[in-house]
Image (tube, rainbow, N blue to C red):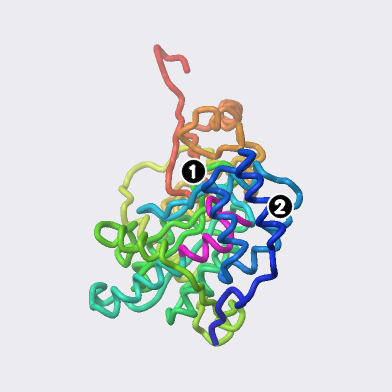
């Protein structure tokens, strides 16, 4: 049976609330932060987080509290993205991620019942990248969608955002979720929402989902292990890997393949998306750039720890390596492999 959060009662936080009022008057907290903190201390739906909020107040962590409570993190047309922190309306945590999943599940379920999704099934495809807590958030979203009556197709193991798009279409799901903050700093995470088309939300569904997310009070969950055991959550990565590779290969063109390539995933999921396709298409001389090869949400060997292939410094190390090995093309993908950067030797007057 689905479980709902939170419990129905909260302890008496009168002294804590008084401290919050005093902090607002002393301008240690903005009025908006003070109001949101009061809500999290007094409304039963936030009971699982109230003790942590109270501990922050007792510890005088006013800056931290103001940062994560001064506003409500928006749910835009692409989803919800921000800094991870265990509490707060302006942070990515179990509550804000749960609201995002619950609101999307509620909206899509109504659209499905109304016949607005064609032949799509009441199902959701879910994938996640190498960021900290991405697997945790993916399982949380799966639990919410199962409790809402969905079948969940779950890619077990880090995968790319383009593969998630293929998964939505391949499984005929009504929607999809990708847990990633793309090329944001290591502190961040996010949820990207996808419609039955495999594309991101478009009008009028974008505003409809946003409204439902903002209206969420109760979050229903079914334990992940229970749903996996009884088949409501289905691991599907092997089939989707094949479908994704076939979809990419269908876009290829004939021609020579004698090119020496150096590829860096920037500590993200790109190796799972790029290397098998290059191999299948006959590119035999492909090297995975070692310093960026390991999946790591801290992006330790990327300049500034910002794994964005649009940022020229991320190519400094790979280009230096390519010059030593004679590689003719350097490719780099961001953490969820939905953007690609490239570098090649510039030949002027016979010199590089």
Q: Residue at x 64, y 39 (%)?
A: 26
Q: Residue at x 35, y 53 (%)?
A: 77
Relative to 209, 8 lies left or right: right
Q: Residue at x 43, y 41 (%)?
A: 340
Q: Residue at x 59, y 54 (%)?
A: 130
Relative to 60, 228 lies left or right: left
Q: Which mark is residue 333?
A: 1
Answer yes or no: is residue 268 visible: no
Magenta span contains residue 351 = no
Q: Camera-side residue: 21 or 5? A: 21
Residue tagged by mark 2?
56
Q: Camera-side residue: 4 or 226? A: 4
User: Height in image: 140 above or below 133?
Assistant: below
Q: Which residues are magenta?
A: 87-100
User: Residue 268's spot in the image, x, y percent?
Assistant: 56, 49
Relative to 8, 231 lies left or right: left
User: Residue 314's spot in the image, x, y percent?
Assistant: 55, 32
Answer yes or no: is residue 240 visible: yes
Q: How many marks?
A: 2
Helix, strand or loop at label 2? It is helix
User: Residue 209's spot in the image, x, y percent?
Assistant: 35, 63
Closer to the eye: label 2 or 1 = 2
User: Residue 95's spot in the image, x, y percent?
Assistant: 56, 63
Q: Camera-side residue: 154 or 209? A: 209
**Quarter assignment of residue 171:** bottom left
Q: Residues within 10 Å of mark 1 (few under 14, many from 20)?
A: many
Magenta span contains residue 95 = yes
Compute the Cα span from label 2 to label 1: 38 Å
Q: Which mark is residue 165?
A: none
Helix, strand or loop at label 1? It is strand
């Amino acid at each position: 049976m689905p479980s709902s959060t939170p419990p129905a009662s909260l302890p008496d936080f009168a002294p804590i609330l008084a401290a919050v009022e005093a902090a607002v008057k002393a301008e240690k907290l903005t009025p908006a932060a003070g109001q949101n903190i009061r809500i999290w201390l007094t409304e039963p739906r936030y009971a699982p987080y109230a003790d942590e909020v109270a501990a922050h107040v007792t510890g005088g962590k006013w800056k931290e509290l103001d940062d994560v409570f001064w506003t409500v993190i928006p749910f835009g047309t692409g989803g919800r993205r921000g800094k991870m922190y265990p509490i707060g309306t302006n942070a990515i945590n179990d509550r804000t991620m749960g609201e995002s999943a619950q609101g999307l599940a509620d909206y899509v379920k109504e659209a499905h019942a109304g016949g607005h999704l064609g032949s799509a099934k009441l199902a959701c495809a879910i994938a996640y990248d190498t960021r900290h807590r991405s697997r945790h958030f993916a399982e949380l979203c799966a639990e919410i969608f199962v409790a809402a009556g969905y079948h969940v197709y779950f890619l077990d193991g880090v995968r790319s955002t383009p593969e998630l798009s293929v998964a939505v279409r391949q499984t005929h799901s009504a929607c999809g979720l990708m847990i990633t903050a793309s090329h944001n700093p290591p502190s961040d995470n996010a949820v990207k929402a996808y419609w039955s088309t495999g594309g991101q939300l478009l009008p009028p569904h974008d505003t409809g989902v946003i409204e439902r997310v903002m209206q969420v009070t109760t979050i229903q969950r079914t334990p992940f292990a229970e749903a996996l055991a009884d088949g409501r959550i289905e691991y599907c990565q092997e089939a989707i890997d094949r479908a994704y590779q076939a979809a990419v290969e269908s876009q290829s063109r004939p021609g020579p393949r004698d090119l020496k390539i150096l590829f860096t995933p920037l500590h993200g999921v790109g190796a799972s998306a790029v290397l098998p396709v290059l191999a299948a298409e006959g590119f035999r001389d492909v090297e995975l750039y070692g310093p960026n090869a390991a999946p790591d949400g801290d992006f330790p060997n990327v300049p500034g720890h910002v794994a964005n292939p649009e940022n020229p410094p991320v190519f400094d190390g790979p280009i230096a390596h390519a010059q030593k090995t004679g590689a003719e093309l350097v490719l780099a993908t961001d953490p969820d492999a939905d953007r690609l950067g490239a570098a090649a030797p510039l030949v002027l007057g016979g010199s590089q």
